[in-house]
């Protein structure tokens, strides 16, 4: 190798690190705040949610279908009402919606910590979901809009910003369950109150740092956005495909705990599997996004991701005839988590990057909200069905095969080609 070749090789090896540094350094203060917000949101949220199913089934004594219904209701009250939250963001702005959402999340977590009756649990779960239905569309729609601006300014593909957003969220999802596992040594109520405390800090920080008016974000007073959105078949197809991914992801909290319990006799390993997922995203999301950006359009990125997710379910189903237990029994679970996470790393940034190209100008909050509302309806129905399927006493591989079919079939729902051709950028 010549001296020039060695220099070029060293520069090439350092290039990915420089790109990562340049991405963060070129972000506006608002984008940095929003990305760090996602980190804090998930720390508080995942300190509680991964342990909710066991609490409902063991401490409160709910049947499996009811646990699945409550988990699905939490997702639906969050994802299903994103449509309302997104419309409120377009009308009133980001800051007030985020602040109200944080206040509701504090109240919901505190209520859940003390809830014992089924009606109280359901009420607390709905409040928790409603809180996210307010602040999540506000944060995500503004990140998507700012990512388009970032791309227009020549810093690179918008998916890099959205990948950083995903990394921050998964870093929170990695830390949250570890904190939750420690707090559960006291009791579930302590974990809930700690989660509420995180959102107290988030509320105070945003009341201080979030600008009253964000430059370039115009509040939409006119009606009629829903009618145009319902007629947008490409957008609705994207919503359905994304909903199948979200249903699959929700199995981390329903089917996976059941499988870990079957394999090991406890759910002690669950927090480590959640940690594995988050660690993979934190370490690999940016390289995967760069690879996908160089080789795949948005449709193929989502299609490959959905197929990887389907393969993850198939791995668990294929391993069941072996009857592995103990540490060996966790290997298929780990394979599922790895493949699900790799699929997530392809699906999530691509879907978020696609929405601004399909949305009407000035209504990105509504469209982001609708993406999650349709997905939430799919999760509500699918989670209840999955809970019933797990209770039927069928061979253990059957539910996993059924779940594998969902993302595989969803590939056919994707719009045929991306709205944005190479080199074309949507208006923010």
Image (tube, rainbow, N blue to C red):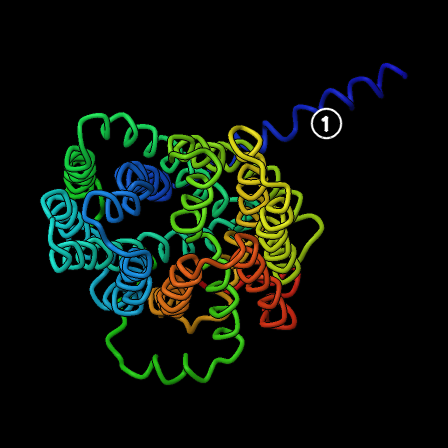
Side of 155 where 211 appears, left or right: left
**Can you give x and y, in whole percent of width and height, for residue 163 in the image?**
50, 44
Q: Nearer the viewer, residue 244 or 181?
A: 181
Picture residue at 39% right of the left edge, 51% below the top: 254
Rate crowding at label 1 as few (under 14), some (14 to 19) or many (20 or more) other CA atoms within 10 Å.
few
**From the image, which quarter does the C terminus lie in?**
bottom left
Q: Secondary structure at mark 1?
A: helix
Query: Would residue 420 be visible to someone looking at this image?
Result: yes
Please give the residue where the numbered disc 1 appears in the rendered image: 12
The residue positioned 81% from the left and 17% from the top of the image is: 6
Corner quadrant of residue 80: bottom left
Q: What x and y, as percent, mark residue 272?
A: 43, 30
Whether residue 184 is situated above or below residue 59 in the rendered picture: above
Q: Residue 15 versus residue 231: which sits nearer the camera? A: 231
Quarter of the image for the N terminus: give it: top right
Q: Residue at x 54, y 76 (%)?
A: 234
Residue 368 in sight here = no
- Residue 33 in the image: state x and y as whole percent: 31, 40
């Amino acid at each position: 190798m010549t001296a020039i070749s060695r220099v070029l090789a060293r520069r090439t090896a350092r290039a990915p690190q420089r790109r990562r540094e340049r991405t963060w350094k070129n972000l506006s203060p608002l984008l940095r705040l929003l990305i760090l917000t996602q980190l804090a949101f998930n720390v508080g949220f995942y300190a509680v949610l991964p342990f909710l199913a066991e609490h409902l089934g063991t401490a409160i004594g709910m049947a499996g279908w009811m646990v699945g219904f409550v988990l699905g209701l939490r997702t639906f009250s969050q994802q299903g009402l994103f449509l309302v939250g997104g419309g409120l963001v377009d009308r009133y702005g980001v800051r007030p919606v985020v602040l109200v959402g944080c206040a509701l999340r504090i109240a919901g977590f505190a209520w859940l910590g003390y809830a014992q009756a089924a009606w109280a649990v359901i009420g607390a779960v709905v409040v928790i979901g409603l809180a996210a239905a307010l602040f999540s569309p506000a944060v995500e729609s503004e990140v998507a809009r700012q990512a388009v601006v970032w791309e227009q300014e020549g810093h690179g593909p918008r998916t890099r910003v959205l990948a950083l957003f995903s990394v921050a969220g998964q870093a929170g999802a990695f830390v949250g369950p570890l904190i939750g596992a420690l707090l559960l040594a006291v009791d579930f109520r302590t974990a809930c109150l700690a989660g509420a405390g995180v959102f107290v800090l988030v509320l105070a920080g945003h009341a201080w740092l979030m600008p009253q008016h964000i430059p370039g974000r115009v509040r939409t007073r006119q009606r009629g956005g829903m009618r145009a959105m319902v007629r947008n078949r490409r957008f609705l197809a994207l919503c359905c495909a994304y909903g199948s991914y979200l249903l699959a992801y929700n199995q981390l909290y329903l089917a996976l705990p059941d499988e870990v319990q079957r394999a090991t006799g406890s759910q002690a390993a669950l927090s480590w599997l959640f940690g594995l997922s988050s660690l993979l995203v934190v370490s690999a999301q940016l390289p995967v996004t760069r690879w996908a950006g160089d080789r795949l359009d948005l449709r193929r990125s989502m299609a490959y991701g959905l197929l990887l997710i389907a393969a993850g379910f198939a791995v668990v189903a294929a391993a069941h005839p072996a009857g592995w237990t103990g540490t060996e029994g966790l290997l298929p679970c780990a394979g599922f988590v790895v493949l699900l996470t790799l699929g997530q790393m392809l699906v999530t940034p691509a879907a978020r990057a696609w929405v601004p190209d399909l949305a009407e100008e000035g209504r990105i909050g509504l469209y982001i909200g609708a993406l999650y509302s349709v997905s939430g309806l799919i999760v509500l129905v699918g989670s209840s069905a999955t809970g019933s399927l797990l209770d039927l006493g069928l061979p253990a591989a059957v539910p996993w095969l059924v779940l594998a079919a969902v993302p595989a079939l969803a590939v056919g729902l994707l719009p045929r080609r991306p709205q944005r051709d190479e080199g074309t950028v949507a208006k923010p």
